[in-house]
């Protein structure tokens, strides 16, 4: 049986209650739309819908046993938020000072930095910590506004996303 997804559009067409069959996934946007519209999501057996645990695949248990150096990223737990900042663009005097000045202005603590310059272009990767877990969106927005269309580009990614992307 193929997997089916319930989207926000499906929720907009529903009224009152929606029965979710086994193996069907509800998108986060659909969950928000259902809550906003007051639509109750139920399982086919009559119980209330709960998001299923992620399917890690058939080799997940073996990978956990044999790859202890790749643990599941821990939750934030109120601690500092880890962030990966990448900057790519044309090299010029003061570009590193501009970026680190913006980091200081945002209250970010630089934990690690790597920079390469090749033929007039640079690539900078910084691992930073934000003291307030709720500050990520504002930080991302302020950093990605730096540079220009022909100068350099800044990308900001939550450390958990980065760690999940680079797992085997």
Image (spheres, rainbow, N blue to C red):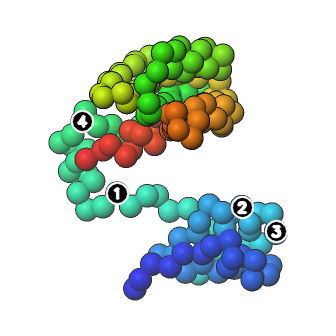
Q: In front of the other: label 2 or label 3?
A: 2
Q: What mark, if any, has residue 68 been given in the picture?
A: 4
Report if the CB atoms under discs 1 and 4 are less than 8 Å apart: no
The numbered mark, 1 or 4, whose residue comes first in the sequence reads: 1
Q: Position of residue 154 (x, y in %)?
A: 52, 35
Name the residue tied to disc 3.
Answer: 38
Q: Position of residue 97 (x, y in %)?
A: 53, 14
- Element carrying mark 4: loop
Q: In front of the other: label 2 or label 1?
A: 2
Q: Residues within 10 Å of mark 4 (few under 14, many from 20)?
A: few
Name the residue tied to disc 1.
Answer: 56
Image quadrant of residue 103? top right
Report if the CB atoms under discs 2 and 3 are less than 8 Å apart: no
Name the residue tied to disc 2.
Answer: 32
The numbered mark, 3 or 4, whose residue comes first in the sequence reads: 3
Image quadrant of residue 117? top left
- 52 or 89, which is in the foreground? 89
Image quadrant of residue 71? top left
């Amino acid at each position: 049986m193929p997997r089916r997804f319930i989207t926000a559009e499906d929720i907009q067409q529903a009224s009152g209650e929606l029965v979710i069959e086994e193996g069907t996934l509800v998108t986060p946007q659909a969950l928000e739309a259902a809550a906003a519209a007051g639509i109750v999501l139920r399982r086919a057996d009559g119980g209330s819908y709960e998001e299923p645990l992620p399917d890690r695949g058939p080799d997940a248990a073996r990978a956990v046993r044999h790859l202890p150096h790749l643990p599941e990223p821990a939750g934030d737990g109120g601690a500092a938020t880890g962030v990966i900042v990448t900057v790519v663009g044309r090299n010029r005097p003061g570009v590193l000072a501009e970026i680190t000045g913006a980091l200081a202005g945002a209250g970010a603590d630089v934990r690690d930095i790597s920079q390469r310059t090749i033929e007039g272009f640079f690539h900078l990767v910084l691992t930073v910590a934000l003291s307030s877990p709720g500050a990520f969106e504002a930080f991302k927005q302020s950093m990605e506004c730096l540079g220009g269309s022909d100068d350099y580009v800044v990308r900001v990614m939550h450390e958990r996303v980065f760690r999940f992307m680079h797992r085997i």
